[in-house]
Amino acid sequence: MTLISGAGISQTVSFYDLRVKTLEGKEFDFSSLKGKKVMIVNTASLCGNTPQYKTLESLYEKYKDELVIIGFPANNFGKQEPGTAAQIREFCSREYGVTFPMMEKISVTGADMHPVYKWLTSKSENGVMDSKVTWNFQKYLIDENGRLVDVLNPRDKPDSDKTLTWLSAK
């Protein structure tokens, strides 16, 4: 089934059709995110970008009424996320006080790429753009209507001017 948005963009899968599992193994349905802006981030515990967890948590706390940040632990780059779900949860809570939703560890590149990342990186899926995940802590911005609007590279701070401008746009 092809969905057509108001902008004339065609996509084969709606963002809100996606489902994942949390670190605790519970079902998480993206349709619950309707009306909110979403930032999706592939995370890793042993990366030079790992301190971004602190900024992600601050951003989430400040904007939680309008923004949902979703972390996806992935071990695709430099084997920097070797932990189990329990180890990842414990690390994120202890070191950074993470309260934003964290999903199960997935693959964000390659033949075993998770369907969420297929949607994020493929214009034929998201109707907007192709992209490639280049490293841990790449950030994808989705608007309150479930449309992909931008990609921030791994070194871009979660609270960059680009992010804050996007958050303030109505």
Image (tube, rainbow, N blue to C red):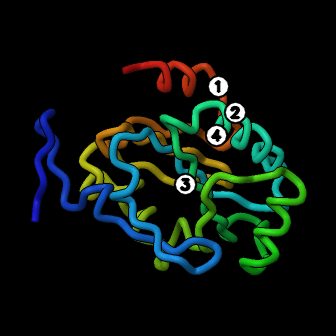
Q: Which residue is mark 4?
A: 60
Query: Is 49 or 52 nearer to us in this picture?
Result: 52
- Write down the residue under mark 3: 133
Q: In the rendering, which numbered label is found on residue 157? A: 2
Which amino acid lies under the numbered mark 1 shown in the image of this protein?
Ser
| Vertical relation: 82 (above or below) 118 | below
Nearer the viewer's eye, disc 2 or disc 4? 4
Q: Identify which residue is drawn at 53% across, 45% down.
A: 68
Q: How many marks?
A: 4
Question: Is disc 4 placed on a helix, strand or loop?
Answer: helix
Mark 1 and mark 2: Cα distance apart in space: 5 Å
Ranked by sequence position, the earlier of labels 3 and 2 is 3
What number is the disc on residue 127? none
Q: Position of residue 48 (x, y in %)?
A: 84, 49
Q: From this view, report whether residue 29 is shown above or below residue 4.
A: below
Quick check: marks 3 and 2 in contact, CB under 8 Å? no
Left or right relative to 168: residue 84: right
Bin the neighbour count of mark 3 within 10 Å (Cα to Cα): few under 14, some 14-19, many 20 and up. many
Residue 122 seen from this side: yes
The residue positioned 57% from the left and 71% from the top of the image is: 22
Cα distance between the residues tagged 2 and 4: 13 Å
Query: Helix, strand, or loop for circle 2?
Result: loop
Q: Residue at x 57, y 44 (%)?
A: 139
Label 2 sits on what residue type?
A: Lys
- Name the residue carrying label 1: 160
Q: Nearer the viewer, residue 160 or 97?
A: 97
Q: Quadrant of the C terminus?
A: top left
Find residue 51 and report its horizontal and vertical position in percent.
Answer: 83, 45
For marks 3 and 4, give the one nearer the viewer: 4
On the image, the x and y values in percent for residue 7 come to 15, 33
Q: Amino acid at mark 4?
A: Tyr
The amino acid pointed to by label 3 is Val
